[in-house]
Image: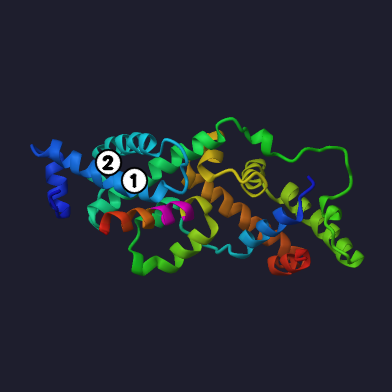
Amino acid sequence: MQTRTNSEWLNDLRGSGQDQAIEDLRKVLKRGLIYSLSNRIKTDLETQVDDFVQDSILRILDKLDTFRGESRFTTWAQKVAVRVAFTELRRQRWKDISLEDLMPEDSGDFTPLVLADPSPNPEKRATQTILTEMIETILNEDLTERQRTAMMAIMKGGMPLEEVARRMDTNRNALYKLLHDARKQMRKGLLEKGLSPQEVIEDFEI
Amino acid sequence: MNLSSEVIQKMMGAVKMTREHELDCGQCYGKNAAEVMPLVQEHLDLCGACREEYQALLDALKAIID
């Protein structure tokens, strides 16, 4: 396979050498994705990777003008391919799960979950109960509904950022900023109550 | 709300790492590495999605360089 500089990649992908350049890029991206996804995809690895590579090449050709030359072209292209692959894998994994599925239920059981922890220390359990109530108050009173929904979906539900973003009609960057604001609000709320995150973590350690 | 100990610890861990100014996911990949590596590292510590993709990218690059 021909070795190309960044300029050569760009020129060939835009010009008369496009077919060969695309074929060479396909091989590069496929090799990289097979290696990096082999532990993550257990069936039909090659078929799925071929699909990811095809989608990636379309995206790369569409975004060629955004390549700034701060890395090797193949590194930039591989980054696009990794993002395409993971976006699709996460979509498949989470497609049947809604945000509502992840929200805590008000089950009517007034026993905080912390009391289910087998901590042998009644004083520690009491402290944990109080801290849990304080944190829930901060979540309910200091965060907006969108911040709270996003925080719970990610922290409690473990849903990936872009899947939460999709369900909240936003994008990953905007959601990260929403969560950043939420974390800052929580930090402020804790400080106002005379607490630090580290103290809370220590009180919940077994 | 019934938060478990595990969720509280995870939440507090993220709050503890919070900085006044952080890179978002798009900025994390678009900056000069030497200049912003501490900020990139902080973002990777907080963002599981970017952390997973970053590791996958490193793995992929090993395959195409070797």
Query: Judging from the image, what secondary structure is the residue with disc 2 in?
Result: helix
Residue A143 can be seen, yes or no: yes
The answer to whether residue A134 is above or below residue A97 is below
Residue A64 visible somewhere in the drawing: no
The stretch of residues the image draws in magenta is B51-56
Residue B55 drawn in magenta: yes
| Residue at mark 1 | A80
Q: What residue type is labelled 2?
A: Ile
Q: What element carries label 1?
A: helix
The chain identifier of the residue carrying mark 2 reads A
Residue B46 relative to residue B6: left or right: left
**Left or right of residue A47, residue A2 in this image:** left
Q: Are marks 2 and 1 on the same chain?
A: yes
Q: What residue type is labelled 1?
A: Val
Q: Counting other residues with Cα less than 10 Å from the Cα at mark 2, is it few (<14), some (14-19), or many (20 or more)?
A: some
Name the residue carrying label 2.
A60
